[in-house]
Image (cartoon, rainbow, N blue to C red):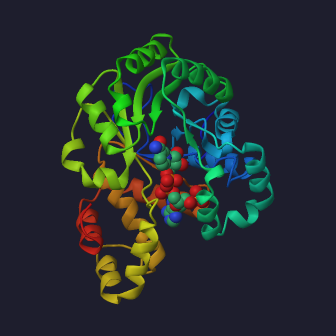
Amino acid sequence: MRRSGIDRLPRAPQGAFDVAPGRLGFGCASLGSRIGAADGLRALGAAYDQGVNWFDVAPAYGAGDAESLLGRFIKGRRDHLLLTTKVGIAPPRRLGAIKLVFALGRPVIGVASGLRRAFRQVSATRNVHAPLSPDLIEQSIGASLRRLGTDRVDIYALHDPDPADVGRDDVARALERVIARGQARQVGIAGTADACRIARKLGAPYGVLQMGVADMAAARAEFSGGAQPIVLHSMFGVDGLKRRVERLLAQDRARIQRLVAAGYADEPGRAAAELLADYAFALNPQGVVLASMFDARHLAVNLDRASRPTTMQAIALLEDMIGRG
Ligand SMILES: NC(=O)c1ccc[n+]([C@@H]2O[C@H](COP(=O)([O-])OP(=O)(O)OC[C@H]3O[C@@H](n4cnc5c(N)ncnc54)[C@H](OP(=O)(O)O)[C@@H]3O)[C@@H](O)[C@H]2O)c1
Protein backbone atom coordinates (compact mmCIF):
# COMPACT_ATOMS: atom_id res chain seq x y z
CA MET A 1 0.00 0.00 0.00
CA ARG A 2 1.51 3.33 -1.07
CA ARG A 3 1.90 6.16 1.40
CA SER A 4 -0.53 8.97 0.77
CA GLY A 5 1.08 11.75 2.83
CA ILE A 6 4.41 13.58 2.87
CA ASP A 7 7.31 11.51 4.11
CA ARG A 8 9.85 13.87 5.59
CA LEU A 9 10.91 11.70 8.49
CA PRO A 10 14.71 11.22 8.67
CA ARG A 11 15.92 7.61 8.63
CA ALA A 12 18.35 5.78 10.91
CA PRO A 13 21.06 3.72 9.22
CA GLN A 14 19.57 0.62 7.55
CA GLY A 15 22.20 -1.77 8.97
CA ALA A 16 20.73 -5.27 9.14
CA PHE A 17 17.10 -4.12 8.80
CA ASP A 18 15.13 -4.84 5.62
CA VAL A 19 14.25 -1.16 5.26
CA ALA A 20 15.84 1.92 6.83
CA PRO A 21 13.96 2.73 10.06
CA GLY A 22 12.36 6.14 10.49
CA ARG A 23 13.87 7.97 13.48
CA LEU A 24 10.43 8.16 15.11
CA GLY A 25 8.65 4.87 15.84
CA PHE A 26 5.11 4.12 17.04
CA GLY A 27 4.54 2.39 20.39
CA CYS A 28 1.34 0.34 20.53
CA ALA A 29 1.06 -0.35 24.28
CA SER A 30 -2.39 1.31 24.45
CA LEU A 31 -3.80 -0.09 21.20
CA GLY A 32 -6.95 -2.03 22.09
CA SER A 33 -7.10 -0.88 25.73
CA ARG A 34 -7.14 2.91 26.24
CA ILE A 35 -7.44 3.31 22.46
CA GLY A 36 -10.24 1.53 20.58
CA ALA A 37 -9.85 -0.20 17.21
CA ALA A 38 -11.16 2.55 14.90
CA ASP A 39 -9.20 5.40 16.52
CA GLY A 40 -6.12 3.20 16.77
CA LEU A 41 -6.11 2.16 13.13
CA ARG A 42 -6.68 5.77 12.05
CA ALA A 43 -3.69 6.96 14.11
CA LEU A 44 -1.41 4.20 12.80
CA GLY A 45 -2.40 5.09 9.24
CA ALA A 46 -1.72 8.80 9.78
CA ALA A 47 1.74 8.04 11.18
CA TYR A 48 2.58 5.59 8.41
CA ASP A 49 1.50 8.07 5.74
CA GLN A 50 4.02 10.54 7.12
CA GLY A 51 6.95 8.15 7.15
CA VAL A 52 6.70 6.25 10.44
CA ASN A 53 7.65 2.67 9.62
CA TRP A 54 8.61 1.19 13.03
CA PHE A 55 5.84 -0.33 15.11
CA ASP A 56 6.45 -1.70 18.58
CA VAL A 57 4.03 -4.19 20.13
CA ALA A 58 3.90 -7.10 22.59
CA PRO A 59 1.48 -9.92 23.44
CA ALA A 60 0.42 -8.11 26.61
CA TYR A 61 -0.29 -4.73 25.00
CA GLY A 62 -3.79 -3.39 24.60
CA ALA A 63 -5.10 -5.91 27.16
CA GLY A 64 -3.96 -8.63 24.75
CA ASP A 65 -5.52 -7.07 21.61
CA ALA A 66 -2.72 -4.86 20.25
CA GLU A 67 -1.04 -7.53 18.11
CA SER A 68 -4.29 -8.50 16.35
CA LEU A 69 -5.16 -4.86 15.68
CA LEU A 70 -1.67 -4.12 14.40
CA GLY A 71 -2.02 -7.25 12.24
CA ARG A 72 -5.07 -5.67 10.59
CA PHE A 73 -3.10 -2.50 9.99
CA ILE A 74 -0.01 -4.07 8.39
CA LYS A 75 -1.98 -6.01 5.74
CA GLY A 76 -0.66 -4.83 2.37
CA ARG A 77 2.07 -2.77 4.06
CA ARG A 78 4.20 -5.51 5.58
CA ASP A 79 7.25 -5.14 3.31
CA HIS A 80 7.44 -1.41 3.94
CA LEU A 81 7.61 -1.48 7.70
CA LEU A 82 9.48 -2.91 10.67
CA LEU A 83 7.81 -4.76 13.52
CA THR A 84 9.02 -5.50 17.02
CA THR A 85 7.17 -7.93 19.22
CA LYS A 86 8.29 -9.42 22.49
CA VAL A 87 8.18 -12.38 24.82
CA GLY A 88 8.09 -12.64 28.58
CA ILE A 89 5.11 -10.59 29.76
CA ALA A 90 1.62 -12.01 29.67
CA PRO A 91 -1.56 -9.91 29.54
CA PRO A 92 -3.22 -9.17 32.90
CA ARG A 93 -5.01 -12.02 34.67
CA ARG A 94 -8.56 -10.67 34.63
CA LEU A 95 -8.63 -10.02 30.91
CA GLY A 96 -12.39 -10.28 30.35
CA ALA A 97 -13.19 -7.80 33.10
CA ILE A 98 -10.45 -5.44 31.96
CA LYS A 99 -11.65 -5.41 28.35
CA LEU A 100 -15.13 -4.56 29.55
CA VAL A 101 -13.84 -1.71 31.73
CA PHE A 102 -11.86 -0.29 28.81
CA ALA A 103 -14.79 -0.63 26.41
CA LEU A 104 -17.15 1.17 28.79
CA GLY A 105 -14.66 3.69 30.13
CA ARG A 106 -12.69 4.59 26.99
CA PRO A 107 -14.12 8.09 26.59
CA VAL A 108 -13.21 8.90 30.20
CA ILE A 109 -9.93 6.99 30.45
CA GLY A 110 -8.76 8.66 27.23
CA VAL A 111 -8.78 12.08 28.84
CA ALA A 112 -8.37 11.43 32.56
CA SER A 113 -4.72 10.64 33.20
CA GLY A 114 -5.35 10.37 36.97
CA LEU A 115 -7.88 7.62 36.30
CA ARG A 116 -5.42 5.90 33.97
CA ARG A 117 -2.77 5.91 36.67
CA ALA A 118 -5.20 4.59 39.28
CA PHE A 119 -6.26 1.81 36.93
CA ARG A 120 -2.66 0.72 36.39
CA GLN A 121 -2.16 0.50 40.14
CA VAL A 122 -4.83 -2.17 40.64
CA SER A 123 -2.74 -5.33 40.79
CA ALA A 124 -5.10 -7.53 38.76
CA THR A 125 -4.77 -5.11 35.84
CA ARG A 126 -1.00 -5.30 35.78
CA ASN A 127 0.83 -7.38 33.22
CA VAL A 128 2.64 -10.37 34.69
CA HIS A 129 6.12 -11.68 33.91
CA ALA A 130 6.06 -15.23 32.59
CA PRO A 131 9.09 -17.38 33.52
CA LEU A 132 11.37 -17.36 30.48
CA SER A 133 12.07 -20.76 28.91
CA PRO A 134 12.88 -22.14 25.44
CA ASP A 135 9.31 -23.48 25.25
CA LEU A 136 7.81 -20.10 26.04
CA ILE A 137 10.07 -18.39 23.47
CA GLU A 138 9.07 -20.84 20.73
CA GLN A 139 5.38 -20.97 21.54
CA SER A 140 5.02 -17.21 22.04
CA ILE A 141 6.54 -16.25 18.66
CA GLY A 142 4.13 -18.62 16.89
CA ALA A 143 1.15 -17.08 18.68
CA SER A 144 2.38 -13.52 17.99
CA LEU A 145 2.85 -14.22 14.27
CA ARG A 146 -0.67 -15.66 14.07
CA ARG A 147 -2.15 -12.59 15.73
CA LEU A 148 -0.07 -10.26 13.57
CA GLY A 149 -0.99 -12.20 10.42
CA THR A 150 2.59 -12.28 9.15
CA ASP A 151 5.35 -14.87 8.76
CA ARG A 152 8.05 -12.81 10.48
CA VAL A 153 8.81 -9.93 12.76
CA ASP A 154 11.88 -7.78 12.38
CA ILE A 155 12.84 -7.84 16.05
CA TYR A 156 11.81 -10.39 18.63
CA ALA A 157 12.77 -8.97 22.02
CA LEU A 158 12.87 -10.30 25.55
CA HIS A 159 10.28 -8.12 27.28
CA ASP A 160 11.70 -6.51 30.39
CA PRO A 161 13.79 -9.58 31.22
CA ASP A 162 15.53 -10.36 34.48
CA PRO A 163 19.16 -9.50 33.59
CA ALA A 164 20.17 -13.01 34.71
CA ASP A 165 17.98 -14.51 31.95
CA VAL A 166 19.75 -12.50 29.26
CA GLY A 167 22.96 -14.44 29.85
CA ARG A 168 21.30 -17.87 29.78
CA ASP A 169 22.52 -20.26 27.08
CA ASP A 170 19.17 -22.02 26.66
CA VAL A 171 17.50 -18.66 26.07
CA ALA A 172 20.11 -17.63 23.49
CA ARG A 173 19.81 -20.97 21.65
CA ALA A 174 16.01 -20.74 21.53
CA LEU A 175 16.26 -17.20 20.13
CA GLU A 176 18.75 -18.40 17.51
CA ARG A 177 16.26 -21.08 16.44
CA VAL A 178 13.59 -18.39 16.01
CA ILE A 179 15.97 -16.56 13.64
CA ALA A 180 16.98 -19.78 11.86
CA ARG A 181 13.30 -20.58 11.16
CA GLY A 182 12.87 -17.10 9.66
CA GLN A 183 10.30 -16.09 12.30
CA ALA A 184 12.39 -13.05 13.27
CA ARG A 185 15.08 -11.17 11.39
CA GLN A 186 16.85 -10.18 14.62
CA VAL A 187 16.43 -10.63 18.35
CA GLY A 188 16.94 -8.08 21.06
CA ILE A 189 16.19 -6.80 24.53
CA ALA A 190 13.42 -4.36 25.47
CA GLY A 191 14.06 -3.68 29.12
CA THR A 192 16.33 -2.05 31.65
CA ALA A 193 19.84 -0.70 31.14
CA ASP A 194 21.10 -3.62 33.25
CA ALA A 195 19.56 -6.18 30.89
CA CYS A 196 20.81 -4.24 27.84
CA ARG A 197 24.28 -4.04 29.37
CA ILE A 198 24.55 -7.83 29.47
CA ALA A 199 23.28 -8.14 25.89
CA ARG A 200 25.77 -5.46 24.88
CA LYS A 201 28.61 -7.50 26.33
CA LEU A 202 27.41 -10.78 24.79
CA GLY A 203 26.74 -9.41 21.31
CA ALA A 204 25.12 -12.24 19.32
CA PRO A 205 22.36 -13.25 19.30
CA TYR A 206 21.24 -9.83 20.57
CA GLY A 207 21.17 -7.40 17.63
CA VAL A 208 19.02 -4.52 18.95
CA LEU A 209 18.75 -2.91 22.40
CA GLN A 210 15.68 -1.03 23.61
CA MET A 211 15.41 0.87 26.88
CA GLY A 212 13.72 3.87 28.49
CA VAL A 213 15.02 7.39 27.89
CA ALA A 214 15.77 7.77 31.62
CA ASP A 215 17.95 4.64 31.57
CA MET A 216 19.79 5.82 28.48
CA ALA A 217 20.33 9.25 30.04
CA ALA A 218 21.97 7.65 33.07
CA ALA A 219 24.15 5.30 31.01
CA ARG A 220 24.69 7.15 27.76
CA ALA A 221 28.50 7.07 27.73
CA GLU A 222 28.30 3.31 27.92
CA PHE A 223 25.69 2.81 25.20
CA SER A 224 26.73 5.44 22.67
CA GLY A 225 28.39 4.26 19.48
CA GLY A 226 28.14 0.46 19.81
CA ALA A 227 27.35 -2.05 17.08
CA GLN A 228 23.79 -2.79 18.23
CA PRO A 229 21.25 -0.13 17.21
CA ILE A 230 19.47 1.51 20.16
CA VAL A 231 15.74 2.13 20.44
CA LEU A 232 14.42 4.41 23.18
CA HIS A 233 10.94 4.43 24.70
CA SER A 234 9.00 6.46 27.27
CA MET A 235 10.39 9.84 26.27
CA PHE A 236 7.73 11.71 28.23
CA GLY A 237 8.58 9.73 31.31
CA VAL A 238 6.61 6.95 32.96
CA ASP A 239 7.34 8.84 36.18
CA GLY A 240 5.64 11.99 34.93
CA LEU A 241 8.73 13.82 33.67
CA LYS A 242 6.71 15.81 31.14
CA ARG A 243 4.37 17.08 33.85
CA ARG A 244 7.36 18.00 36.00
CA VAL A 245 9.08 19.96 33.22
CA GLU A 246 5.81 21.67 32.34
CA ARG A 247 5.34 22.70 35.97
CA LEU A 248 8.89 24.03 36.22
CA LEU A 249 8.36 26.10 33.09
CA ALA A 250 5.01 27.42 34.28
CA GLN A 251 6.49 28.45 37.64
CA ASP A 252 9.43 30.44 36.33
CA ARG A 253 9.20 32.85 33.41
CA ALA A 254 13.01 32.99 33.08
CA ARG A 255 13.05 29.27 32.29
CA ILE A 256 10.54 29.49 29.50
CA GLN A 257 12.27 32.57 28.10
CA ARG A 258 15.49 30.63 27.88
CA LEU A 259 13.68 27.95 25.89
CA VAL A 260 11.97 30.50 23.65
CA ALA A 261 15.40 32.00 22.89
CA ALA A 262 16.51 28.51 21.84
CA GLY A 263 13.53 28.21 19.44
CA TYR A 264 10.98 26.40 21.64
CA ALA A 265 7.30 27.23 22.07
CA ASP A 266 6.14 29.87 24.52
CA GLU A 267 3.51 27.63 26.13
CA PRO A 268 4.81 25.34 28.93
CA GLY A 269 3.04 22.12 27.82
CA ARG A 270 4.13 22.43 24.23
CA ALA A 271 7.68 23.55 25.15
CA ALA A 272 8.06 20.60 27.56
CA ALA A 273 6.99 18.12 24.86
CA GLU A 274 9.33 19.68 22.28
CA LEU A 275 12.26 19.71 24.68
CA LEU A 276 11.73 16.12 25.84
CA ALA A 277 11.43 14.89 22.26
CA ASP A 278 14.63 16.72 21.27
CA TYR A 279 16.32 15.29 24.36
CA ALA A 280 15.43 11.71 23.34
CA PHE A 281 16.63 12.22 19.77
CA ALA A 282 19.86 13.81 21.04
CA LEU A 283 20.52 10.89 23.40
CA ASN A 284 20.09 8.47 20.49
CA PRO A 285 21.30 10.36 17.41
CA GLN A 286 21.72 7.23 15.24
CA GLY A 287 18.71 5.25 16.43
CA VAL A 288 14.94 5.13 16.79
CA VAL A 289 12.82 6.90 19.42
CA LEU A 290 9.40 5.38 20.10
CA ALA A 291 6.33 7.26 21.18
CA SER A 292 2.70 6.51 21.80
CA MET A 293 0.91 9.06 19.60
CA PHE A 294 -2.68 8.15 19.15
CA ASP A 295 -3.56 11.83 19.51
CA ALA A 296 -3.00 13.54 16.13
CA ARG A 297 -1.53 16.62 17.87
CA HIS A 298 1.10 14.43 19.52
CA LEU A 299 2.01 12.84 16.21
CA ALA A 300 2.40 16.30 14.64
CA VAL A 301 4.72 17.58 17.39
CA ASN A 302 6.84 14.43 17.42
CA LEU A 303 7.18 14.35 13.62
CA ASP A 304 8.16 17.99 13.65
CA ARG A 305 10.89 17.42 16.24
CA ALA A 306 12.14 14.24 14.51
CA SER A 307 12.40 16.12 11.23
CA ARG A 308 14.72 18.80 12.60
CA PRO A 309 18.48 18.36 12.80
CA THR A 310 19.33 16.64 16.10
CA THR A 311 20.31 19.33 18.58
CA MET A 312 22.66 18.47 21.43
CA GLN A 313 21.72 21.70 23.22
CA ALA A 314 18.49 19.94 24.31
CA ILE A 315 20.58 17.80 26.68
CA ALA A 316 22.06 20.82 28.45
CA LEU A 317 18.75 22.71 28.51
CA LEU A 318 16.83 19.83 30.08
CA GLU A 319 19.51 18.69 32.49
CA ASP A 320 20.14 22.25 33.71
CA MET A 321 16.47 22.28 34.62
CA ILE A 322 16.02 18.86 36.22
CA GLY A 323 19.54 17.69 37.09
CA ARG A 324 21.47 14.96 35.27
CA GLY A 325 20.21 11.43 34.54
N1 LIG B 1 10.02 -2.66 28.13
C1 LIG B 1 9.41 -2.29 27.02
O1 LIG B 1 9.44 -3.00 26.03
C2 LIG B 1 8.68 -0.98 26.92
C3 LIG B 1 8.44 -0.19 28.06
C4 LIG B 1 7.76 1.02 27.90
C5 LIG B 1 7.33 1.40 26.63
N2 LIG B 1 7.55 0.60 25.55
C6 LIG B 1 7.08 0.97 24.19
O2 LIG B 1 7.29 2.35 23.95
C7 LIG B 1 6.05 2.98 23.64
C8 LIG B 1 6.04 4.39 24.17
O3 LIG B 1 6.26 4.39 25.57
P1 LIG B 1 5.29 5.07 26.64
O4 LIG B 1 3.89 4.90 26.23
O5 LIG B 1 5.76 4.59 27.97
O6 LIG B 1 5.68 6.59 26.62
P2 LIG B 1 5.42 7.84 25.66
O7 LIG B 1 5.55 7.50 24.24
O8 LIG B 1 6.36 8.83 26.21
O9 LIG B 1 3.87 8.24 25.87
C9 LIG B 1 3.34 8.69 27.10
C10 LIG B 1 2.17 9.58 26.82
O10 LIG B 1 2.63 10.75 26.16
C11 LIG B 1 1.67 11.14 25.19
N3 LIG B 1 2.38 11.91 24.13
C12 LIG B 1 2.99 11.45 23.01
N4 LIG B 1 3.50 12.49 22.30
C13 LIG B 1 3.21 13.61 23.00
C14 LIG B 1 3.46 14.98 22.78
N5 LIG B 1 4.14 15.41 21.71
N6 LIG B 1 3.02 15.87 23.71
C15 LIG B 1 2.36 15.46 24.80
N7 LIG B 1 2.08 14.15 25.08
C16 LIG B 1 2.51 13.25 24.17
C17 LIG B 1 1.01 9.88 24.69
O11 LIG B 1 -0.34 10.16 24.31
P3 LIG B 1 -1.17 9.51 23.09
O12 LIG B 1 -0.75 8.11 22.86
O13 LIG B 1 -2.58 9.63 23.56
O14 LIG B 1 -0.96 10.39 21.87
C18 LIG B 1 1.08 8.98 25.93
O15 LIG B 1 -0.12 9.09 26.67
C19 LIG B 1 4.96 2.06 24.24
O16 LIG B 1 3.74 2.23 23.58
C20 LIG B 1 5.59 0.71 23.98
O17 LIG B 1 5.37 0.33 22.65
C21 LIG B 1 8.23 -0.57 25.67
Q: Residue at x 32, y 26 (%)?
A: 167
The answer to whether residue 295 is above or below residue 138 is below
Q: Nearer the viewer, residue 245 or 71?
A: 245
Where on the picture, by quarter, is residue 41?
Answer: top right
On screen, residue 53 versus residue 278, left or right, reads right
Q: Nearer the viewer, residue 295 or 322?
A: 322
Q: Position of residue 112 (x, y in %)?
A: 65, 69
Residue 26 visible in the shown view: no
Residue 117 visible in the shown view: yes
Q: Where the C terminus falls, by quadrant?
A: bottom left
On screen, residue 196 versus residue 221, left or right, reads right
The answer to whether residue 324 is above or below residue 74 is below
Q: Where the N terminus falls, by quadrant?
A: top right
Q: Position of residue 181 (x, y in %)?
A: 50, 10
Q: Residue at x 35, y 89 (%)?
A: 253
Q: Position of residue 86 (x, y in %)?
A: 51, 33
Q: Position of residue 254 (x, y in %)?
A: 30, 87
Q: Residue at x 41, y 41 (%)?
A: 191
**Number of disc labels:** 0
Where on the picture, by quarter, is residue 312?
Answer: bottom left
